[in-house]
Amino acid sequence: MKNLSRRSFVTGAAAGATALSALGVFSPSADAQLVYTTADWRVSEFDKVVKDPARVKQVYDVIPIGGGKFLNNIKNSLNGLRFGFGLPAEQIKVVAALHGPTNMLNFDDSIWSKYKIGAWLNVTDPATGQPATRNPFYASKAGPGLHYASQDPDSEESIYQDTSIQALQHRGVKFLSCHTATEEQVRGLIKVNKLSQSPEAIVTDMLAHTLPDVLVVASMVAAIALLQTGGHYSYITVG
């Protein structure tokens, strides 16, 4: 079967999209790309995550932001496996599969500020008590260099009690962003904030500002299935 390029996919779907639009079902932009094909993203990088040789592998399926409490759950998994069960750090692999509202945690401060993400998703910045205009879940209090005052896992001044995305990434956690969720969320964001840009222009802007080391996957629900069946990751959902 001949592979479909982005343009051929969109062109081939145009007739059906036009008919649905006429019925009032939806009104796609001319350049809409609701579905990624294998040529559009780093499939090989995802395959490495699936095939990671770690002894214990977990995938956290996270949709609600919930004040970022799931980050503490991931920290507890790492600490329990490392110190409670004595597994070497290299034998532990945790993947954070963020979709739904949590997908926005994969983007940097400029996106949170520009598109008023905190006000949209009811996320308060603990530093100001106001709707967040920065991503309050990313940066570590230990600073960009992650300089900690203690190596004691029980100390709040150690990396082992740091629940920031930056610290968890440093400990080997792989954060995934969902392309499908981004496309869907942008359309909702446009309505709420009455934005004039096209959905694809905003999606492109967001994808250019993903956090360091975040991997954008075509579809998170599909990625989770592959992590479970192909990579034998244990599944944890956070409600």
Image (cartoon, helix red, strand yellow):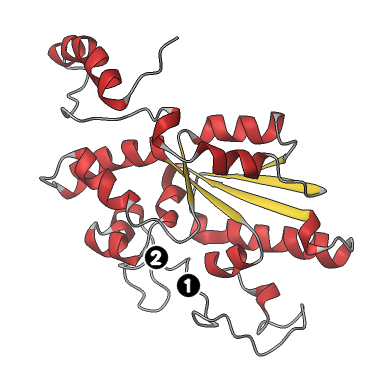
Callout 2: SS: loop
In which quadrant will I find the C terminus?
top right
Q: Indicate the position of residue 216 as horizontal and vertical percent values.
A: 45, 44
On the question of residue 134 being in view, the answer is: yes
- Examine the rendered structure and indicate whether residue 40 appears above or below residue 164: above
Callout 1: SS: loop
Q: Indicate the position of residue 107 as horizontal and vertical percent values.
A: 38, 57
Q: Are the residues flagged by discs 1 and 2 in contact, CB closer than 8 Å?
A: yes
Q: Indicate the position of residue 202 as horizontal and vertical percent values.
A: 23, 46
Residue depicted at x 63% and y 31%: 226
- Examine the rendered structure and indicate whether residue 29 appears above or below residue 99: above
Residue depicted at x 39% and y 55%: 210
Q: Residues within 10 Å of mark 1 (few under 14, many from 20)?
A: some
Query: In the shown orientation, is residue 98 left or right of residue 122?
Result: right
Q: Residues within 10 Å of mark 2 (few under 14, many from 20)?
A: many
Q: How many marks?
A: 2
Q: Which mark is residue 139?
A: 1
Q: Indicate the position of residue 212 as horizontal and vertical percent values.
A: 46, 61
Q: Amino acid at mark 1?
A: Ala
218, 58: nearer the viewer: 218
Query: In the shown orientation, is residue 142 left or right of residue 1?
Result: right
Query: Which residue extends farthest bottom?
Result: 149
Q: Amino acid at mark 2?
A: Asn
Q: Which mark is residue 83?
A: none
Badge 2 is on which residue? 135
24, 20: nearer the viewer: 20
The alpha-carbon separation of the residues under discs 1 and 2 comes to 8 Å
In which quadrant will I find the N terminus?
top left
Which quadrant of the structure image shows residue 164?
A: bottom right
On the question of residue 239 being in view, the answer is: no
226, 101: nearer the viewer: 226
